Structures are given as C-alpha cells and as structure tokens.
Amino acid sequence: MASTTPLHDESLSPGITAIDTSLPSLSPLFTSLRSLPFFRLYSCDMLASCEYIPQELFECYTESCEIYPIDDDEVPMDIKSNDFNEHEFELDGWARWDMPSDDYYDTLQFPEDYTGYDGSEVWGFIHNRIGFHEEEALVRDEYDADSWKADFNKAVSGLHAMVSAQVVRGMIEKLQDTGELDPESYQWTDPVEEYERRLGANGETPEAVENMYFTMMLLLSGVRAARDRLLQDCDSGSIGDAEACETLRSILTHPLMDDPNIDAASRRLKDHALRDTNNLWEARMRTRDLMRIMNCVQCNKCRFHGKISTLGLSTALQLTLGRQGMGGDVAKIHRVELAALVTTMGKFASGIELCYEMQAL
C-alpha cells in the first residue's frame, strides 16, 4: 500500500493489494488513452460565477493558471454533436455538466499542473458544508461510520487526496525543470513537506491515501459497469480508430477489472444505501453542488480538471447507486460522463503512483 498508515477499514485491504499489483501494467495504458479526443476534449464554462462563497478576485501569479479553447476545427464533429444532443436538464440528477458550447478545452494541451493556487477555501467549504456531519455517528467517524453518508465523505476525501497528489507531482516536475520554485509565485516549495502535510500518516488527514484507494475502487466498479457501453462505442467508431480502441480494450479487459476485491467500496456503499433509499436524494443534491462549487476555483486550469474529476466521481456514484441504490442505467450515461469517468480513473492511478514514489524516498 502507498501509505504506512494502518487501514481504518480492513475490508479494503485485498482491493488495495489488487490495485498495487496492477498499476504497473495499467498506468501506461492510461497515458496512451489521454491522447484520444474522446477522453481529452471537454466543453466547459470557464467564466461561470461562484454562487457559494463571497470571494475577492484572485490574481494567479503564474501563466500556468490559464487555459484557452482549442480551434473549432480540432474538435471532431461527432463529439460536438453528441455533446449537444445528449445534454439535458434532469431536476434530480447526479450532476449537471456545463451547457455545451463551441469552446472545447484539451487535457493534453493543458494537463494537471502545480500553479501555486491555494484552493483551501473551496476544499474547506466542500468538506464542511457539502459533506455530511449532522449525525452523531458521523461526528465520531466521518469516513467509516456505518452509513452511506460516511461513504460519501470518504469518496470526496479520496478526490481531495488525488488532487493533493497531483499538486505534489507538479511541484516535483517544476523543480526538475527549473531547479527551484520562486516563493514570490508559489506558496509551497517543498514537495516532501507538502506530501507529509497533505497525504502523510501524521498529516492533516491521516486517512487520505486510504480514502484515495476507496474512491479508486468506486471508479473501477463504475468503469466495469460501463464496459459494454464503452465497447459498443468502440465498435461504432465513436471512441476512435482501431488502435485507440485496442488501448481502451486493454484497460477494460485487464484482470483488475474483474477482480472481485475491487468491489469492496461499491459493496459497502450499496449495502449502506439500501438501508436508507428514501434519502439518497441528498447524495444526488450534493454531487450537483460538488460540481457547481468548482466555479469558485479561481485558477482556470484547476477549475477545468476539478470539473472533470467531480463529474467522473458523480458518474461512478450514479452507476453504483442509481435512484434507489440498485445501480444506474448505463444507456443513459452521456459521452462526457463516460470520458470523465475513465479519465478520472487515470488521474487516481497517477495519484496512487505518486504516493509510491514518495514512500520510497
């Protein structure tokens, strides 16, 4: 495991071992998949206003905060038409992706990065206001109480841990490129210190790495639930050419996808949800809020990747739970949701690998 912290939920241990064993062969496939337009192009509203917290305008002191739309002729027409045709308003849906427009952004052109932006205010709002805390059991154990609300908190914490891992990786890459980080532009300059603070056993969230594995398992279960749909899209030519589809098939048919141990997270969530199906609307409401709070992120690159990651998580939850805890209808999942689901799984794989690397230091 990519952490020295003892597990709070020992039932996750076999799934964690399965992930650790599989990532060396899976990660290169995710890298290849990032080059495919289906998984790298997203139409996002980068100008939407923050509706949750009063903010002063943040000036990003590095150019790496900014992203720009790609040229219109670089967006395949089938992606654009699918996104327009599939977009719909669902009153009580799991997420509301931005209204599609002609502005598409490319994760390959603008990958995850360390920009120097401080997102602590937004993350504080997510954990304190969007997360669940009102029940006594959640006060005692917000991540592992006997409740689907604790499972939700754990999944969101895992999302935060993945983002923290990407920040640390970005710091390391910038130091390798430039030799130093200017403290005038970057608040944090020591990746080891930041890893220990954000993800370490004695850091701010000792369960952070465990929670990242938990969310990774939810994503793996979600991708497996969408496997037939993704293969159909391959056969129809929606994903890309034969070489592109072969890369995707290699992921979808990887032994990890059929390892029953990765079901630990989704099984725990389902078991809890089936005892409280009348209140699952609260989970759907919070995933919508989780998506919209990303409009409060004032670093555009961070906002872009934050939106993709929250959509990936909400799609995994939708496929796991559906309306009544029995699972969602994969036929209703949109192109952008499928793309975000698989892309986010790749982000988590990269985050877990970063933890391996830091543990080896």
Image (cartoon, rainbow, N blue to C red):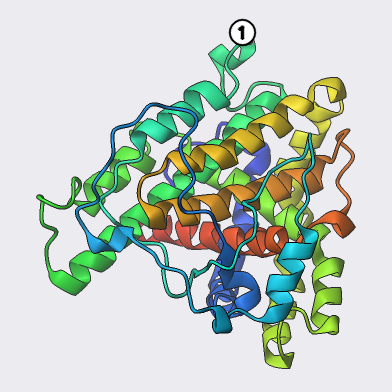
Frontmost residue, 354 versus 249? 249
Q: Looking at the image, which residue is at 56% across and 31% down?
A: 8
Residue 179 locus on image (x, y percent): 12, 68
Frontmost residue, 348 versus 7? 348
Residue 85 as seen in the image, left or right of residue 265: right
Residue 68 locus on image (x, y percent): 41, 67
Residue 264 locus on image (x, y percent): 73, 43
Residue 354 as seen in the image, left or right of residue 361: right
SS for callout 1: helix
Frontmost residue, 2 versus 290? 290
Q: Quadrant of the C terminus?
A: bottom left
Residue 117 locus on image (x, y percent): 29, 47
Quarter of the image where one finds residue 254: bottom right
**Can the viewer see residue 210 in this picture?**
no
Q: Looking at the image, which residue is at 85% across and 67% down?
A: 229
Task: Tell me if residue 204 comes above or below residue 193 in the rendering.
Answer: above
Task: Tell me if residue 285 comes above or below residue 192 in the rendering.
Answer: above
Residue type at mark 1 is Glu
Total numbered labels:
1
Looking at the image, the residue that sits furthest to the bottom is: 242
Mark 1, other Cα within 10 Å: few <14 / some 14–19 / many ≥20: few
**Can the viewer see residue 98 in this picture?**
yes
Residue 317 as seen in the image, left or right of residue 68: right
Residue on which the image places disc 1: 136
Frontmost residue, 342 versus 49? 49
Looking at the image, the residue that sits furthest to the top is: 136
